[in-house]
Image (cartoon, rainbow, N blue to C red):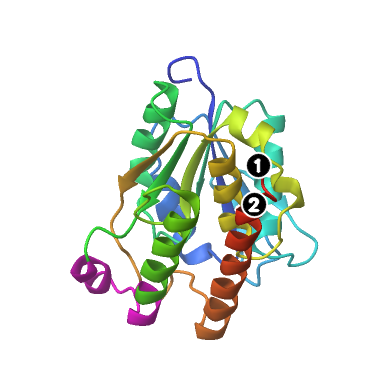
Amino acid sequence: MYNQKKIIVVLPAYNAAKTLEQTVKDLPALVDEIILVDDHSNDNTAALARELGLMVFEREKNGGYGANQKVCYRLALDRGADIIVMIHPDYQYDPKLVKYFAEFIAADYFDVMLGTRIRSRREALDGGMPLYKYVANRALTILENFISGYNLSEWHTGMRAYKKEVLNKIDWPNNSDDFVFDSEVLFQIVAQHYRIGEIPVPVRYFKEASSINFWRSLRYGLSTLIVGGRYLIGRFK
């Protein structure tokens, strides 16, 4: 417990065996529980997670990134989490920073925390982010800020933390099972006027880190634009 808050980290996993142990090792001591949901991996992600002492849920078939997160959040809430931190177990985001995400929420400064990889173009590209992904990230974030009236530095991060009241309020169970799930959640949060904080996180793109290809990225971008349009017509109120 930290500040009388139960902190649970959820790891939506798919073929994460090569990076899982390092991810778990770097999580701070204030974390009370770690839940890994395996989206029918082709490697030994689930077996390794059990060896590491994690709570493991294995999906019978691959359902997609959004579907995986839905299981993550339901399990965390059912186990009494006050603060839920979602981080990809591919070590693309620094697990040590979970400490600060949880502390900002536990101290009631924010309801939601985001890890932003975009501090400068040079840093993002030097960290291995492909140029087309950097350009798409910047363009979509600018548009989403304009639509929402917020001024977030990145809308497309895979490291997020939520106060339980946020996940109890917004309608995430009916969101997409695909990657656009994250955009839908963030627009739902904006529509409810929750306080959003950001922490800079290092950019880490490497061979073992998960990443969607150009065509999946394009589909994700178009889906995000549709979500923005739905927000504009009041679909997330």
Does any portion of residue 17 appear in the rendered image?
Answer: yes
* Magenta region, main secondary structure: helix
Q: Quadrant of the C terminus?
A: top right
**Residue drawn at 23 percent across, 69 percent down:** 121
Q: Quadrant of residue 2?
A: top left
Q: Which secondary structure lies at badge 1? A: helix
In the image, farthest residue toward the right: 60
Left or right: 118 in relation to 233: left
Left or right: 237 in relation to 220: right
> Which stretch is magenta?
121-134
Q: To which residue does mark 1 refer?
A: 73
Q: Using the image as rendered, state which of residue 182 and residue 194 is in the foreground.
A: 194
Question: Can residue 201 be found in the magenta stretch?
Answer: no
Q: Position of residue 70 (x, y in %)?
A: 70, 49
Q: To which residue does mark 2 refer?
A: 69
| Proximity of marks 1 and 2: CB atoms separated by less than 8 Å | yes
In the image, farthest residue toward the front: 233
Question: Can residue 126 be found in the magenta stretch?
Answer: yes
Residue 54, label in figure: none
Q: Position of residue 197 (x, y in %)?
A: 38, 39
Left or right: 198 in relation to 226: left
Q: Is residue 39 above or below residue 171?
A: below
